[in-house]
Each structure stands twice: as structure tokens, then as C-alpha cells.
Image (tube, rainbow, N blue to C red):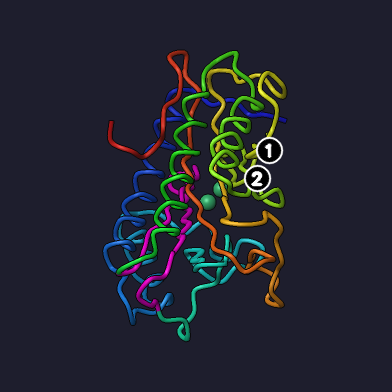
Amino acid sequence: MILLKSTAEIDAMDQANRLVHRALVHVRDSAAPGVTTWDLDQKAEALIRSEGGMPAFKGYRGFPGTLCISINDVIVHGIPSRSVRLRDGDLVSVDCGVVMDGFYGDAAISFGVGRVSEEACRLMETTQQCLEDAVSEVRPSNRLGDVGAAVQRRAESAGYGVVRDFVGHGIGRSLHEDPQVPNYGVAGRGQVMKPGLVIAIEPMITAGSWRVKIDDDGWTARTEDGRIAAHFEFSVAVTENGARVLGVEE
Ligand code: MG
Ligand code: MG
């Protein structure tokens, strides 16, 4: 069941997403060789709580962190750890969720630590472009297939893989709502987007195969072939005028 949101509800979700993006920027600015992923998680949690939000991921199906921090071949759902230190050249993907005033925000960014390879830069740039292409398809009467096809077209024409095992999602008073928002699909197919629909669009793009394996911790999702992956995510509202990317200054 798809729950459409009023403008007031979308404004509340914008506030939650503002806090998500502030946390992400804070984490990116704090990242450096030698810093542990635990340190980054603590900084994000402190910022979120000091601004009146709550970490949305912490305790979600038992996830222990405020952030998912996924390094190099880890695609998503990396668990912050005192024993994982960032290293020069790492490609880091950070996913953050916040709940504030009853509404969820959810966004992710990837960035490099120190000097990163040209391959990693190109993958991150293309993944960000995938997200922008997807957002440009968000408007009333377009379909979710248009969103997925836009991601897939950009990624595959660059020679990259599109992860199938995880998808974007509706978001609102719950972190994950209907509909599912795949990063692949056929333009002109799938659910029609209506004003008031809010979706988290989150391309997960791999340098090689899109196939995934999960570590024994039950969370950490890696590329099966060990090649790098990147992840960007926005929460996006469908309005009469097109896409409204939540939490981002216009
Ligand atoms: Mg997320
Ligand atoms: Mg999400």
C-alpha cells in the first residue's frame, strides 16, 4: 500500500533529511586515514541527537550503528567498528537515517579518503550521475520503470554493474514503505508516480559484477568478485512541479 504525503508531511520529511545531510557532511569532513568507522558513527549519532533527531538505523532489525559504513568492495550495510580504520585510497560509502517528529529521512554518499584511484573516482562520479538521472525522471505520470531504466542506462553504458539484491523504497512514517524502487527496469513500465509519493532512490553500482555476497555478520554486503562499489541516495518527493530532493538546499 502506497501512502501519499501532504505538503506539510513532506516539509517535515525535508527537516529530517536536512539533519541526515548535515550528518553525512560532518562524517565526510571527519574522515581521514587512521580514523575508525566507530569514531565516525559516534560523531554522527552525537550530531543527530543534539539536533533533536534519533538515529533510524540503530536497532533496526538489530543493526548496531547509526551509520552504515561500507568500504571498497563492501556495497552497503557495513557495520561501524572500533577495529576498522580508514586508509588512504579507500572508497567509503556512508548511509544515514534519521527519524524526527515521526518522519524518516534517508540518504547516502560515497567519497574517497586521501588519494583515491582514477577507477574509484570514475565509479563515484558515475553513481552520483545515476542518481541525478533518476531524479530527473521523477514527475507525475512518469513511472518507476523510468527511474530504474535511467540508473541502469547510465551505469551499464559506463561498463558497470547494477546491484539487484537491494533496491530503493518508499519512505515516510516508516523507514521502508511501498513501493520498491529498483535501480533497473524498463522505461514506461511499473507504478505511475503521483504527487505526494516520497521515495528513497539509491543506486548501488559496482565496478564489475553486480553479484553480492553477505558476510557471516548477516549484514555486510560485498561484491562477489571483490571489486569496488559506490552508493548514493536521496529521499525524493513527487510534486506537481516534478522532483523535490529532500534535505538539500535549493
Ligand atoms: Mg539509506
Ligand atoms: Mg534507503
Amino acid type at image mark 1: Gln
The answer to which image quadrant residue 197 occupies is top right
**Which residue is at a point 63% across and 49% down the rendered structure image?**
161
Q: How far apart are labels 2 and 1 at the CA level?
A: 6 Å
State the residue at coordinates (47%, 25%). Answer: 136
Q: Earlier in the sequence, mark 2 or mark 1?
A: 2
Q: What label does residue 227 carry, if any?
A: none
Closer to us: 186 or 165: 186
* Quadrant into which the N terminus falls: top right
| Residue 135 horizontal/vertical position (percent) | 48, 30
Q: Is residue 98 magenta?
A: yes
Q: Which residue is mark 1?
A: 180
- Whether residue 104 is in magenta: the answer is yes
- Apparent side of residue 28 relative to residue 82 in the rendered image (left or right): left
Q: Quadrant of residue 174?
A: top right
Q: Secondary structure at mark 2?
A: loop
* Residue contact between numbered discs 2 and 1, judged by CB atoms under 8 Å: yes
Q: Main secondary structure of the magenta part?
A: strand
- Residue most toward the bottom? 83
Q: Quadrant of residue 148?
A: top right
Q: How many marks?
A: 2
Q: Position of residue 181 (x, y in %)?
A: 64, 37
Relative to residue 18, is residue 123 drawn left or right? right
In the picture, the disc for residue 167 is: 2
Where residue 113 sits in the image (x, y, percent)?
A: 34, 68
Q: Amino acid at mark 2?
A: Val
Please give the name of the residue rendered at 44% of the width and 37% of the height, measured from the top-left corner. 13
**Region rendered in magenta:** 86-114
Nearer to me, 18 or 90: 90
Secondary structure at numbered mark 1:
strand
